[in-house]
């Protein structure tokens, strides 16, 4: 039996022994009664017992200790009533809504397995939730731009390092320097910003807290030492203080910019950028560390934002427009050859499955499940395939996993359960042992399971609330009452999240009731919103953006709208019938654009699927539906991206750049070639 398996059985048996005795116990009691400790030397026992207690506490097991006032010995207790889940007062439709979240996210969500295990515990003893799938699961499509099997595997390793407080080493690619370097990190927390995963921790080489994008890790993640624990989380650490800033605010602040926003753009800026600055009398003021990304944001607004100050910002906008004109006037530039590069995934982690729940948590839940199946009797018969499927255990490993349960003891030779697979009949035979009922109820959620539910709510929460006809904060509050002892941080809800949540609720209700909705929408490139009458069909959650797919009655055609550009949505009383053969997710008449990216931006474009060229530039092909969307994407790169095809868009970009020079009040300072080394 492996070291990890020995530890797993030892920890479960320690939990069982402490709960069964229901009295304060000394370390000597533990060493003499719990299998796995008795044959250790005193020194080894002290080390392993300390490590096991620390890991159990990190897993959410409410193990407490205090000193005996007479003997001075440390006494340990674990009250069973503190170990098990309280009855969570979720109504069936609310639990079904959370189950729907799993269907939304399965196969796209790094924490799908811990989420599945958490819901298994929450639904224990409540029939009807294993196969349930509501209609909403077919109405929402979720995608995470940063998700990959490699990333999910790295998150799993980082979760382990964070919970065990172990120092890690890995190779990391820095886009600013375009170099890969070795990093040593004490990982404190994982966080998700704008659909991107980051790990935050103490960079040991730089002696400072740093944030690393997980997808930029270029090697396996290794423990730096063989110690049980390398560091302790500083009590003053606050993960919310390490939110990833806007691109122009990364680094040391260099100054404050003032930008006039035109027409109804002001409300959109207030909604989406309230964290980056302030809006007063139509002027957006924002601190900046780097003026070039801010100039790109100004250009993306396509005339709806005018740079006022400082002069460096106006100059950067002017230079960007000059590059846009130079790059799109005349012939298409000659391209270098494509460069063959080795995919970093071949040099580092092999693709693995999504985040695995702790084996400790799996065994807790599995033990509760088989004991619950016994009920008041002494035995039970369970379908082997169904049991393996419920807990995501490979079928060929089911007997090995059940064998671990058979080793969990209450001390003194008393065991909890005996379970084995009968392969001939395809069933699992379960015999409940003397004290088995102690584990019959589901345990409290582990921090990883709690985090999985919290992240699922953040991903698709507004739709969950709408489908369950229950306010989102009520569903979240009930969950937090169950695992509140884990003190999971939650960023305060801002204006953008509040407004977006209301829009999703309205549109989701309209989808369910088949009612027409009137929306006010600010189209990219327009100064004022327009009112449209739409039939909403389904949602798409491409982190961090919500989209709704509709049939637009005003335009008499299919249209997809981003909720962050929607000013309001009002449900009418007019009903509609679904249109035969209409696929609202299909982009009709989509086109392909070929884009060249200069070495200045190529490093970032490669992360989004572009192909490298031998001169350090890059080439990409992207799908687009409207000229306005493609124009804004090209403008945002301030001349570092050039349209190669279609040819009509080259002329449009050049003409628009010339118009913007006049509209924004900036003049050409110097001519610069489009292609830069």
Image: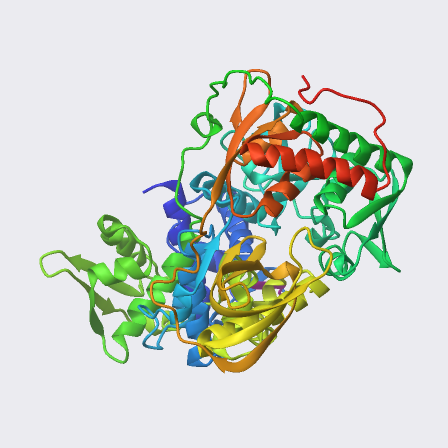
Q: Split into 4 quadrants, where in the image is the C terminus?
A: top right
**Where residue 215 sits in the image (x, y, percent)?**
54, 38
**Where residue 440 sits in the image (x, y, percent)?**
36, 72
**Where residue 670 sits in the image (x, y, percent)?**
83, 23
Q: Which residues are magenta?
A: 64-68
Q: Dominant secondary structure of the magenta stretch?
A: strand
Depth check: 517 or 610 in front? 517
Instruction: Name the image quarter holding residue 531.
Output: bottom right
Q: Is residue 371 left or right of residue 642?
A: left
Q: Is residue 120 left or right of residue 642?
A: left
The answer to whether 128 is drawn above or below residue 176 in the figure is below
Report the residue that reaches farthest toward the left.
424
**Where residue 619 sits in the image (x, y, percent)?**
54, 27
Depth check: 35 or 460 in front? 460
Confirm whether residue 431 shows in the render: yes
Report the residue that reaches farthest toward the bottom.
573
Q: Is residue 105 magenta?
A: no
Instruction: Name the image quarter holding residue 34.
Output: bottom left
Instruction: Name the image quarter holding residue 529.
Output: bottom right
Q: Split into 4 quadrants, where in the image is the N terminus?
A: top left
């Amino acid at each position: 039996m492996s070291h990890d398996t020995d530890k797993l059985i030892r920890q479960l048996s320690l939990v069982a022994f402490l709960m069964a005795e229901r009295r304060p116990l000394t370390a000597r009691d533990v060493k003499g009664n719990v299998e796995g400790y008795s044959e250790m030397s005193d020194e080894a026992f002290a080390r392993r017992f300390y490590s096991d207690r620390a890991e159990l506490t990190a897993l959410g097991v409410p193990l407490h200790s205090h000193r005996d006032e007479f003997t001075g010995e440390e006494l340990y207790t674990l009250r069973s009533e503190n170990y098990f889940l309280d009855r969570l007062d979720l109504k069936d439709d609310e639990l079904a809504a959370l189950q729907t979240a799993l269907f939304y996210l399965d196969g796209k969500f790094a924490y799908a397995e811990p989420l599945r295990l958490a819901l298994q515990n929450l639904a224990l003893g409540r029939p009807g939730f294993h196969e349930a799938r509501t209609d909403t699961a077919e109405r929402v499509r979720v995608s995470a731009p940063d998700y990959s099997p490699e990333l999910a595997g790295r998150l799993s390793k980082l979760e382990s390092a964070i919970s065990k407080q172990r120092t890690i080493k890995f190779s990391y690619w820095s886009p600013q320097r375009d170099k890969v370097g070795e990093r040593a990190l004490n990982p404190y927390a994982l966080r998700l910003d704008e659909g991107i995963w980051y790990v935050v921790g103490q960079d040991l080489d730089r002696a400072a807290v740093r944030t690393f994008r997980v997808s930029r890790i270029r090697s396996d993640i290794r423990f730096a030492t063989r110690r049980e624990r390398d560091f302790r989380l500083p009590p003053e650490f606050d993960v919310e203080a390490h939110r990833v800033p806007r691109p122009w605010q990364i680094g040391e602040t260099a100054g404050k910019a003032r930008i006039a926003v035109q027409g109804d753009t002001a409300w959109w800026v207030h909604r989406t950028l309230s964290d980056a600055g302030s809006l007063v009398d139509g002027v957006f003021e924002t601190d900046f560390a780097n003026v070039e990304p801010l100039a790109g944001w100004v250009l993306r607004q396509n005339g709806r934002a005018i740079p006022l100050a400082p002069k460096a910002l106006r100059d950067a906008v002017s230079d960007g427009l000059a590059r846009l004109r130079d790059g799109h006037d005349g012939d298409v530039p000659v391209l270098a050859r494509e460069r063959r590069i080795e995919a970093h995934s071949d040099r580092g982690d092999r693709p693995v499955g999504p985040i695995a729940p702790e084996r400790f948590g799996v065994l807790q839940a599995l033990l509760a499940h088989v004991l619950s199946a016994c009920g008041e009797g002494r035995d039970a018969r369970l379908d082997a395939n169904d049991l393996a499927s419920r807990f995501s255990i490979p079928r060929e490993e089911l007997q090995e996993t059940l064998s671990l349960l058979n080793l969990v003891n209450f001390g003194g030779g008393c065991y909890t359960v005996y379970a084995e697979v009968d392969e001939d009949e395809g069933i699992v035979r379960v015999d409940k042992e003397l004290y088995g009922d102690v584990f019959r109820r589901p345990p409290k959620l582990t921090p990883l399971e709690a985090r999985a539910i919290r992240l699922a709510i953040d991903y698709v929460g507004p739709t969950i609330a709408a489908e369950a006809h229950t306010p989102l904060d009520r569903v979240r509050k009930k969950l937090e009452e169950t695992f509140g002892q884990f003190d999971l941080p939650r960023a305060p809800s801002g204006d953008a999240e509040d407004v977006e949540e209301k829009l999703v609720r309205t549109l989701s209700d309209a989808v369910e009731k088949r009612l027409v909705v009137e929306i006010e929408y600010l189209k990219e490139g327009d100064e004022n919103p327009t009112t449209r009458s739409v039939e909403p069909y389904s949602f798409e959650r491409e982190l961090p953006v919500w989209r709704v797919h509709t049939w637009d009655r005003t335009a008499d055609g299919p249209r997809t709208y981003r909720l962050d550009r929607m000013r309001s949505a009002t449900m009418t009383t007019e009903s509609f019938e679904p249109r035969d053969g209409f696929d609202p997710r299909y982009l009709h008449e989509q086109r392909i654009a070929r884009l060249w990216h200069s070495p200045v931006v190529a490093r970032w474009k490669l992360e989004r699927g572009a192909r490298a060229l031998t001169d350090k530039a890059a080439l990409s092909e992207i799908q687009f539906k409207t000229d306005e969307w493609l124009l804004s994407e090209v403008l945002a790169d301030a001349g570092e991206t050039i349209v190669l095809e279609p040819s009509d868009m080259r002329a449009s970009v050049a003409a628009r750049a010339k118009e913007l020079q006049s509209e924004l009040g900036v003049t050409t300072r110097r001519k610069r070639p489009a292609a830069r080394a």
